[in-house]
Amino acid sequence: VRGDALERTLEGVHVAISAGGTREPLDPVRFIGNRSSGKQGYALARVAAQRGARVTLVAGNTADLATPSGVDLVRVGSAVELRDAMHKVAADADVVVMAAAVADFRPVSLTGHKIKKTDSDPDPIVLTKNPDVLVELVSSRRQGQVIVGFAAETGDETTSVLDYGRAKLKRKGCDLLVVNAVGDGKAFEQEDNAGWLLSREGAEASIPHGPKTQVASVVWDAVTARLTASQ
Ligand code: CTP
Ligand code: CA
């Protein structure tokens, strides 16, 4: 592992991090959600704060995690709320990290009252696309801002996890993309993580299996190198 979490290499840097999963409401008591625990995003926030950064953490639903000390926490529910919060914070941030599991779709209509059970079959849930927050943040980026995305992939018969990651990096236009293999008990809700760190210039480094704080250290080392190079 490169880098020491206690070196204050992010002094004077404002970082905006999204973490956890969004919840897309169906009615006042129900939602569509996902299994994201927020642990990787919180680990990124903790390590950045230890390195001296000013950290704003925009968190959707998470496991029961302690807010890292010195970190400003903004709570959000849906993808659209997360998007609004991230745009606000990113306008003043030197680094943006999208570690949140943002729902790709949301129910078209939100009923103001609880959907009641009747004798007939329920109506199908009609979904519409959510905005791609990462793509939006890339297109409104400030001069010199470093933007990091995450990709959780399973791979399939035709395409490997890494190939999906490479394609996603191009599509998103961010500077760095952390690619994690998921499924089979990997990544989601786990303490450990592993994967690859891809850069827009085509550099590819494998991230060794280890605690999510170690993955965070690798990410912040790469971000710091980019910030230093652009000064
Ligand atoms: N992301 C986002 N807004 C969305 C969906 C995803 O900002 N509506 C961000 C995630 O926070 C992550 C990156 O985009 O940093 C990749 O998310 P992922 O779900 O892997 O990519 P998608 O483009 O949604 O593609 P797919 O789910 O089909 O693999
Ligand atoms: Ca997605």
Image (spheres, grey):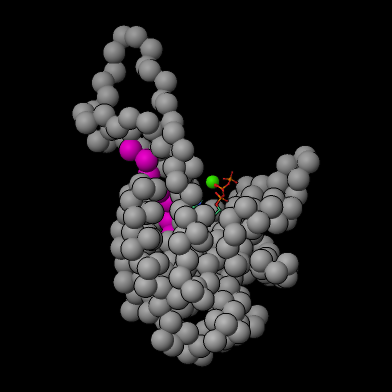
Q: Tell me: 180 left or right of 134.
A: right
Residue visible at 44% across and 31% down in the picture: 127
Horizontal and vertical percent position of residue 160: 75, 49
* Residue at image point 34% right, 9% down: 120
- Image height check: is 66 above or below 157? below
Find the residue positioned furthest to the bottom: 7
68 shown above or below 155: below
* Residue placed most toward the observer, 91 or 177: 91
* Front residue of 190 and 207: 207
- Count of picture labels: 0
Task: Examine the rendering and report whether any part of residue 45 can be seen.
Answer: no
Can residue 229 be seen from the camera position used here?
yes
Q: Residue at x 43, y 82 (%)?
A: 13
Q: Which residues are magenta?
A: 19-25
Q: Is residue 78 magenta?
A: no
Percent of width and height locating residue 171: 62, 52
Outermost top residue: 119
Q: For the view shown, which residue lies furthest in the left direction?
A: 113
User: Residue 129: x, y in percent?
Assistant: 46, 38
Position of 155 compared to 229: left or right? right
Residue 69: quadrant of the picture: bottom left
Residue 209 in the image, given as x and y percentages of width and height: 66, 67
In the rendered image, which quarter contains the N terminus?
bottom right
User: What residue sits 42% from the left and 26% below the top?
Assistant: 126
Which image quarter holds the C terminus?
Answer: bottom right
